[in-house]
Image (spheres, helix red, strand yellow):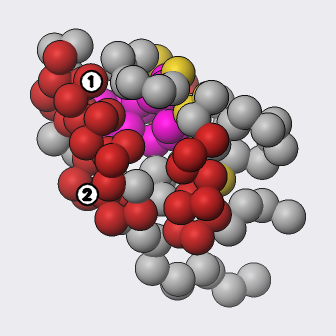
Amino acid sequence: MMADTTPKPLLQVALPEFSEDLAAGLIADGRPDLADQIPGLRIWSQCGCNRSDCTSFYVGPEPAGPWSEEGKHENVLPDVSHAMVVLDVVAGIIRYVEVLDYPQIRSALDAASPPPQ
């Protein structure tokens, strides 16, 4: 099996308004350490749940097992307008962005990272 060498799109290029809103929410919540990561985050793949209200995506490799096997895991809920967002942060690094009820980003996310088959 060959490794995927396709460049992963930058979150702030694919979803600029969402990225700004996420960064502002993290700063307002006292998490500048996470906001500082946003310029380097890349969209790896979309969630495969197929729920109509879900536009969640990975910004790092999917875990082989529970997040906790890769380091200290925490959920961070930044105050983001227009959506419910939960970040999976592992060992201080944002790895997954759960986004619910924000259908406006679906087309941009699909263009950046096609949904799983």
Q: Does residue 61 lie above or below 74 as drawn?
A: below
Rate crowding at label 1 as few (under 14), some (14 to 19) or many (20 or more) other CA atoms within 10 Å.
some
Q: Is residue 34 left or right of residue 13?
A: left
Disc assigned to residue 53:
none
> Where does residue 38 sit, x and y in percent of width and height?
26, 47
| Image quadrant in which the N terminus is located | bottom right
> Where does residue 85 sit, x and y in percent of width and height?
49, 25
Q: Earlier in the sequence, mark 1 or mark 2?
A: 1
> Where does residue 19 sit, x and y in percent of width and height?
32, 45
Disc 2 marks a residue whose amino acid type is: Gly
Q: Does residue 9 lie above or below 27 as drawn?
A: below
Q: Is residue 2 left or right of residue 67?
A: right
**Toward the viewer: 37 or 103?**
103
* Residue under pointer 2: 40
Count of numbered labels shown in the rendering: 2
**Toward the viewer: 104 or 49?**
104
